Amino acid sequence: MQLTVNGVPIDATGSAPSQTLLRFLRTRAGLPGTKEGCASGDCGACTVLLAGPGEAPRAVNSCITLLGSVAGETVVTVEGLAGSEGPGRHPVQAAMVDCHGSQCGFCTPGFVMSLAGLYAADGRGDDAIREAIAGNLCRCTGYRPILEAGRRMYDYPPAPVVPECGALAAGLNHSGALPAGYHRPRDEAALQRLLREYPKAWLVAGGTDAVLELTQRYAAPDPVLDLSAVAELCTIDDGTDALRLGAAVPYSRLEQLFATLSPPLVAMLERLGSRQIRNRGTLGGNLANGSPIADMPPVLLAWDATVELAGADGGRRSIPVAAFHRGYRDTVLAPGEYVAAVTIPRAALARPHRIFKLSKRFEDDISTVLLAVSMEREGERLGAARVAYGGMAATPLRAAAVEEILTGATLDDATIERACAAATAVFTPIDDVRASAAYRRAMAAALLRRALRELREGVDLDIDAVEALHA
Ligand SMILES: Cc1cc2nc3c(=O)[nH]c(=O)nc-3n(C[C@H](O)[C@H](O)[C@H](O)COP(=O)(O)OP(=O)(O)OC[C@H]3O[C@@H](n4cnc5c(N)ncnc54)[C@H](O)[C@@H]3O)c2cc1C
Ligand code: FES
Ligand code: FES
């Protein structure tokens, strides 16, 4: 197996299937500039840039990226950045130095690489800078000088981040031997063949959940079946009647796809993990992990989406998302079965909707409560309403009692308050580290009140005051 690191092809054959990219870089490749902070995708110290053949570089957390998943790709670490004249400081590094963006320096390579990803995409403006570094934590400098570096990095003589990125990767041995026990099929036929051969294989897509089993619980799965290159699973079918999303499509592609289709979804996705997580994490993984606080299932419930499941024997079945979760972290996936795609009817996408996520930290945090509301209008009255929550029960769930109150009603204040009271009453959430049950119930009503008022008035309520708290 080969990959390019900072322009140098490296043979990584002989690595373990559970080897992370971070471990490989710091040991076999002898590049200790990339740091390990949390080993769970939370701190960003391990950020590197990754690019497949012909792709623009994107920031990823190398601590939760499996080495086998980057076969044939180009990796850029902090050691690989250079100035406009070759060796020397890259504009991002120069700006970090000149703006005093580093103190102890432990987080600095990660911030530099996140900003380098933004620089490569010519991303400008405070919102873009904040978004790029939302997955990086600094415990001593503070963020103001780092934000300033993000603003000033374009003031220096321009330098490419990875000029030869795509070309180099294209010349590599892309499908050569992977680490023993690591399988990365290119199509569903090969995937199904491998599932028959290794019925107990460990499935991984973006790895943003699964690889934590390795780094936090020291699992050493073998064999590993990587879904991230299965062509059919990476395909988006933008059909007339429905949108079919392959299960291994990462969030960063969904953000682009939904830019015009659903601004509320895009606003929520900006808070799903970090840029690094969204560059790897997938819809299929978000469903298959069965989490009651996964962000996408409530949205898919409100949109009447269906999940397409496929098995090792080639059999396929489609079920409503509502029938997918069976209990806490339990789904209807049978052994040897995988999530192939999710289909969202166009008609559902066209309905007025709102999606609100509440979490302890504004960026890069798992939901405490997530609400997705979608409704049909029949003149002054509401048609069928869908109200779905995450974080309120053992599974993502539609609130039937709330929907009953809303369906066919006029959306006046009294109806809104009755619906909110029902939202508080119907759930028995748990107390946990994220919130008490009482807080969750109160927020279920508060989010619903805001969503219904916004839908009634056809406007987004002003949340500048909320955002100012996070500035
Ligand atoms: C720092 C951090 C922040 C996060 N923030 C959020 C957040 O804000 N909101 C949120 O919802 N999640 C969040 N997550 C969780 C995770 O990123 C998402 O759930 C993501 O969608 C998982 O997708 P993946 O492709 O990375 O899944 P993987 O990690 O590859 O897999 C997850 C599980 O699903 C299985 N699996 C994956 N794909 C398939 C498939 N197609 N068929 C069958 N099984 C499959 C795997 O075997 C594994 O059990 C966060 C994670 C981290 C580390
Ligand atoms: S080491 Fe913290 S995100 Fe990777
Ligand atoms: S400079 Fe010390 S943690 Fe950021």
Image: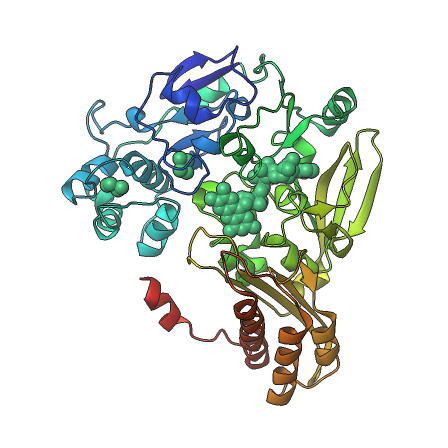
Residue positioned 31% across, 40% down in the render: 111
Seen in the image, is 35 located left or right of residue 283? left
Seen in the image, is 201 located left or right of residue 454? right
Whether residue 252 is visible to the viewer of this picture, yes or no, is: no
Above or below, comparing residue 390 to residue 446 in the picture = above
Above or below, comparing residue 381 to residue 273 in the picture = below
Above or below, comparing residue 363 to residue 1 in the picture = below
**Where's residue 64, x and y in %?**
49, 33
**Where's residue 447, x and y in %?**
54, 71
Above or below, comparing residue 186 to residue 386 in the picture = above
Whether residue 46 is visible to the viewer of this picture, yes or no, is: yes
**Where's residue 46, x and y in %?**
38, 33
Number of numbered tags placed on the structure image:
0
**Where's residue 263, x and y in %?**
53, 61
Q: Where in the image, quadrant-wise, is ligand 1 located?
A: top right
Q: State which quarter of the image contains the C terminus.
A: bottom left
Furthest toward the front, the residue is 431
Seen in the image, is 55 located left or right of residue 183? left
Residue positioned 58% across, 71% down in the render: 441
Color encoding of the figure: rainbow
Seen in the image, is 29 located left or right of residue 156? right
